[in-house]
Each structure stands twice: as structure tokens, then as C-alpha cells.
Image: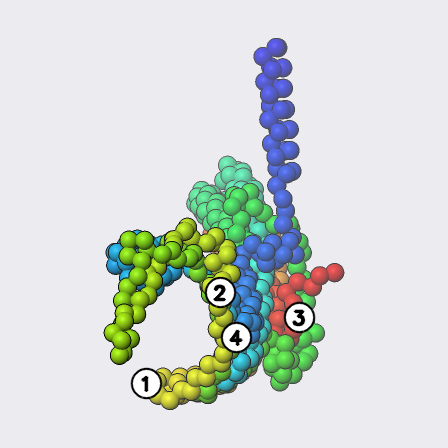
Amino acid sequence: MKKIKVYSFLLFFILLFGTSVSAQVKKWTLQECVDYALKNNISVKQSELDTKTTAIDKKLAIGNFLPSLNGGASHSWNIGLNQNITTGLLENQTIQYTSASLTSAVSIYNGLQNQNRLRRTKLAELAAQYHLTKMQDDVSLYVANAYLDILFNKENLKVQEAQLMNDEKQLIRSQELVDAGVVPRGDLLDMKATVAADKQKKIAAENSLLIARLSLAQLLNLEDFKNFDIADMEMEAKPSVVMAESPEAIVEKANQVRVEMKIAQSNLDIAERDIKIAKGAMQPSLTGFYSFSTRAGYSERVTGVTLDTANPTSIIGQVEGTGQNVLQPNYLPVFSKAAPVFEQFSDNKGHNFGLELRVPVFNGFSARGNVEKSKVNFEKTKNAFTQAKLDLETNVYKAITDAKGALNTYEASLATAEARQEAFNYAKEKYAVGIMNAFDFNQAQTLNTTAQSDVIRAKYDYIFKMKVVELYFGIPIIQKQ
């Protein structure tokens, strides 16, 4: 009895623990999936980094308007025959000195290149934001499609499980009929084969559901995808008000709201601005400059003179007529240690400023070649803009056609499923009284199950394709309350 109580307690603990763990598994809604993907999807993160790059380029373009300021300093040793910077004499010695400088320059005029570059970076920043918006729309659409795929596979799994449960009941019924001698043993074997096939279909449905969950988890960039699951929700396949609009109206609306056209227009504006930048390089440029420099030496300096007692005078000439020698006193320089460094910096400082004009005359056709390349790129971008407009129109018409086709398929599948259900109900009645063999009954049941799966598949296909049409009309995938 004690062992039984212990086992019962362990079993209760395991069931309780398992229930609590299962209850902790988060069930993701479609809104949560889309919001999480927009923050964590790798493609979205890459687009966000692109926007940061364009913001940095904008700061650099603004910096081109500001003066440059650079400082420098050096300390050197000259060994050998050098000119003493203090005495000006050539001496065989080691001289060291320190110099410092500060330079500044500002562009006054350079063909309006700085202005055009700034405008270009603003356009690039806007284009990057459009690319981010498009990526967010694409990811939202992918998430919605993956989410609907999971819902489809869940409902399909339920259909396969119900089919297996019914066939297992029929297998028991067939065994009873065979034991009673009402139906031949071959019907029992057919029913066993049907049950085995149902189990295979159930396993395939489970695998499809697992793959669908994995695909959505990867879109969300989740690490713990094994415990990932979505909340069960009922999706109605109801017509959209957008389908009441004419295709022309939807195309016109798409040209206004879709970022594809905004991206194409931004690229066209950038290409036009590139032409102006290239032309600016062919104009003269005017730059203002200023520099400040100073230096200090560490050699002894001359602070005075003293009479040379060994040779106090020297003859420098004679007086004409008398022949008297003209004498000059001989002085020797008096050296002392170098002046303080900061005092030398103050004494030796200097300034240099002015204007520099550069006129491009010939640079190997580079300036003119850049202009021609920019013009060619503009024409290519213009063609890309026209192609983007045509592609958008084509995609809208295709989306409308696909949505209408999906609706027709869904309505047809509903009618087919209703007819198959009635045929299956009739087959059950005939099989129950023994006037239909197991093979024909299984065929009717398989057709009914297939029809139910077709309805589910057509329903979610229609919902997704309707979402695509709504997206072209400016309606977001998820409308927040």
C-alpha cells in the first residue's frame, strides 16, 4: 500500500508539473508576431542600419560647410653639421627643437558642391526610410502568410485526427460485422489499410505544422522555436471593401501610397542631384586659409659679448696717407642656456593667412567624364522609375486577379465539400446496413476528407491574397485598435 501511495504521489506531481510547464508556453497572436518581427527580424535590422548610415552621411555633408582646424607638433634631433637656429652658424653638433602649428581652412565657393551634397544626403536618408518601410511591409506580409499557414496546418491536422478517429471506430464496427458474418473479411482488411493510411496522413500533417511553426519562428528571429506556438483564432473569409473598387482606382491609390514608387522617385532625385555635383567640380573653387606656427630650440643662446683678452684687437685696414693701422676690438660671444620654452614660443610665433583660388583647366577628362556618367545614370534611373510604375500596375492587377480566383476557388470548394459530406453520409448509411463494401466506403470518406482540407486551404489562400490587395490600397496588414 505504501508503494502504491508513493507511485500515486509521483504520478500526481509529474502531471501537475507537466501541466504548469505547458501553461507557461506563450501563445503568440498575429499582432504580437508582427510587432516582434519588426523589432527583431534580421532584414529589418539591416534596413535600420542603412538609415543610420545615411544619417551619418548627412552629418558629414553638414560638416563640409564648417572650417577645418588641425593642430600639429614635432620634436626633432639634428645630429652633425647643422645651422644653429640661435646663432645662424654652421656647427657640428646635435640640435633639438620643438615646433607647433595650427591650421584652418574654409571653403568659400566650390561650385555649390557642398550644398548639393547636403541635399543629396537628405534624399538618400529619405530613400533609406522608404526602404525600411518597404522591408517592414514585406516582413509583415511574410509573417501574416506564415501565421495563416500555421492556422491552416492546425485545422488540417484536426481534420486528419477526426478522420483517423472515425476510421478507428469503423474498424471496430467492421470487426464486429465480420465476426457476425455480415461482411466479408476483405472489408476488414481494407479498413485496416485505411486506418494505417490515416495515421500516415496524421504524421504528415504534424510534420507540416512543425515546419510552419519553424518558418514563422525564423522570421521572428526566435531562438527557442521548439516551444513556439500561436494562439488559435478564427479567421473569416469575408469579402473586402477594396474589391468593390475598380482596378484603375486601386492602381491609382497604390501609386500614391506604396513605397515602391516613393523609392523610385527618390532614386531619380538623387541621380539628378549627382549631375549638379559633377558639374560643380568643373567650376572654380575659392578657399580661405589661416595658419599659426611657433618653435623653440634647446641650444645655448648668445646673451652678450666680452673682449678677447688673448687677441684684443685686429687690424681691419690702414689710413691712407699716414699708413696708420685701423684697429677693431675683438669680441667673443657670451653663451648662456636656452630661453624658457614658452618664452621662445611667444617670441617665435607667426601667422599666415590668405585666399586660394583653383581653376580646373585640364584633369584628364575626369570632371567632364563624371558629368557624362551622371547623365547616363540619370537616364537609367528614369527608366527604372518607369519600370517600377509598370511593375506596380502589373502586380496590382495580378493581386486582384489572384484574389478573385481565390474567392472563386473557395466558393467552389465549399460547394464541393457540402456535396461530398452528403455523399459520405449516404455512404455511411449504406455501409451500416451492409449494402456497400469497405473499399467504396473508404473512397467516399477519403473524398470527403480531401474536400474539407481543400476548403481550409482555399480559405486561407483567399484571406492572404485579399490582404495583398488591401496592402496595395494602403490598408496595413494589421490594423491596431
Q: Which residue is mark 3?
A: 475
Residue found 48% across the figure and 68% down from its top: 350
Q: Judge from the rendering whether residue 336 lies leftward or rightward of residue 324; answer left or right.
A: right
* First reached walking from the N terminus: tag 1 or tag 2: 2
- Relative image position of residue 399 (x, y in whole percent): 56, 75
Can see residue 67?
yes
* Marks 4 and 2, the one that precedes in the sequence: 4
* Dot 1 alpha-carbon crowd within 10 angstroms: few under 14, some 14 to 19, many 20 or more: few
What residue would you read off at disc 1? Answer: 364
Q: Percent position (x, y) of residue 410?
A: 59, 67
Q: Tell me if residue 355 comes above or below residue 169 in the rendering.
A: below
N-terminal of the two: label 3 or label 2?
2
- The amino acid at mark 1 is Gly
Q: Residue at x 61, y 78 (%)?
A: 254
Q: CA distance from mark 4 to mark 3?
A: 50 Å
User: Which amino acid does the dot numbered 3 rest on?
Assistant: Ile
Q: In this orientation, which residue lies closer to the viewer: 42 or 317?
A: 317
